[in-house]
Each structure stands twice: as C-alpha cells, then as structure tokens.
Image: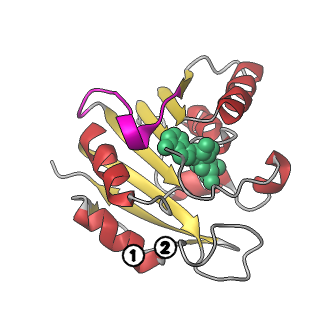
Amino acid sequence: MVIRESGMPEMERWESFFDPHAILLAFGLSSEDKTIIDFGCGYGTFSIVAAEISLGDVYAFDNDDYFLAESRKRATEKGLEKVHCIQRDFVKEGVGMQSGSADFVMLFNILHAENPINILLEAYRVLAPKGRAAVIHWNYDPLTPRGPSMDIRPKPEQCQIWMQDAGFELIAPKLDFPPYHYGWLGQKAE
Ligand SMILES: C[S@@+](CC[C@H](N)C(=O)[O-])C[C@H]1O[C@@H](n2cnc3c(N)ncnc32)[C@H](O)[C@@H]1O
C-alpha cells in the first residue's frame, strides 16, 4: 500500500528543502543510538546522515524499487555497509523487526498516510523502552513549494495528537525546521 501522494521531486531539489544533519542533531540523535529505523527512506536523505552520526546500524525501509536502489547506491558509495536498505510495505506488514529492538525511529514526511496511527503504533512497538520517535512534516501552508495537498496534509497539532494516541510522550516542544518543516519528538515509556 503506497502512502498517498508521496510528492517526491528529483533528489537534488528534494534535498534543498531541509538540512538533514541539523534536523537529526536537533532531535538528539547521537553515536549512542545503535539501532535506527527509517520508515520510508526515499532517497536515503536521512538514513545516510543518521548512519554517519551513529555508530550503529540503520534499517531503511521503502516499498519502492527506485528509491531503495537510490538509497543503496548512496550507502555503497559512502562505504556505509551498516545502512540496510529493505524492501517492505510497512503499512501492510510492519517492519518485521523484533519488538523493543530500536533506539530511534524516523517518520519523515510520511504521516499524510491514510492510517498514520498504525504506522506510529508499529514505530512504538519496535522501539526499546525510552526509545525515541522523530517526526517531521511539511508546514501546514499551501505556499510550500512541495508537500502533500492540503486536504491530506496533517497540521502539527494533529501529528502531536496521533503520537500521543500511539502511546508516545512528547519530550520536546514543537520544533521548527525552516523554511518548510516542523517536527515532534516522542519517547516510549520505560
Ligand atoms: C515523501 S517520501 C519521504 C522520504 C524520506 N522519509 C524523506 O523525508 O526524505 C515517502 C517515502 O515513503 C515511501 N513509502 C510510501 N508508502 C510506503 C509503504 N507503505 N511502505 C514503505 N514505504 C512507503 C515512498 O516510496 C517514499 O520513498
């Protein structure tokens, strides 16, 4: 099941919309985070940078052959064998990893899905106690140069409620990633 309207332009343009390194550091990703999961890795924009920050492994999931191939190519070019690019529909099947096995999950530009709570519940399941889930999404503003159409684009408060409904405690106020994105950071209970 493909998430509605992924709206991905070519890679260079996509990656001009944000600074992945600054975003991941703002979320507190560190070398201590050993198992990281990227739900819908796209071009590997965040998976690759996460692997450079962390000493551990990154599991990058996508159901689209093209995006997986791009992510794999970039990881190989950088010698990052610890980026594991896995084809999987996480809406239908989950990520297939053991419960409680991850330190940090990334849910970036995907919560316009038809059932965001199910994705967040899968993220919650797979995180270890005190593991963190980072969400970013496009500002709720029709003037952003890309992003899902406004009828399916979630408002920041909506993402906040979904995260709390999935069980996360929000451990930071809403983050702003100008010019076009905002973020939330949630934590699984101990
Ligand atoms: C808008 S892109 C965001 C990519 C990346 N998270 C980023 O922010 O750079 C959404 C990605 O999720 C993937 N995707 C959509 N539905 C999916 C599903 N059900 N299972 C796995 N991947 C999915 C798409 O193929 C696409 O690469």
- Label 2 near ligand 1 (CB < 8 Å): no
Q: What residue lies at 59% left-to-right and 41% top-to-bottom?
A: 41
Q: Are marks 1 and 2 in contact (CB under 8 Å)?
A: yes
Q: From which residue to which does the magenta span run?
A: 87-100
Most common secondary structure along the magenta stretch: loop
Is 173 magenta? The answer is: no
Q: Which residue is denoted by mark 2 in the rendering?
A: 154
Q: Is residue 95 magenta?
A: yes
Where residue 186 sits: x, y (%)?
A: 33, 59
Picture disc at residue 114: none
Observer able to see residue 127: no
Name the one closer to the observer, 19 or 108. 108
115 up-or-down from 164: above or below: above
Category of crowding for the residue at label 2, using alpha-carbon neighbours closer than 10 angstroms: few (below 14), some (14–19), many (at least 20):
many
Q: Is residue 27 above or below residue 190?
A: below
Does residue 11 lie above or below 178 as drawn? above
Which residue sits at x=80%, y=46%? Answer: 11
Q: Disc 1 marks which residue? A: 158
Q: Secondary structure at mark 1?
A: helix
Q: Percent from the top left, x then y, of residue 16?
A: 80, 58
Q: Amino acid at mark 2?
A: Pro
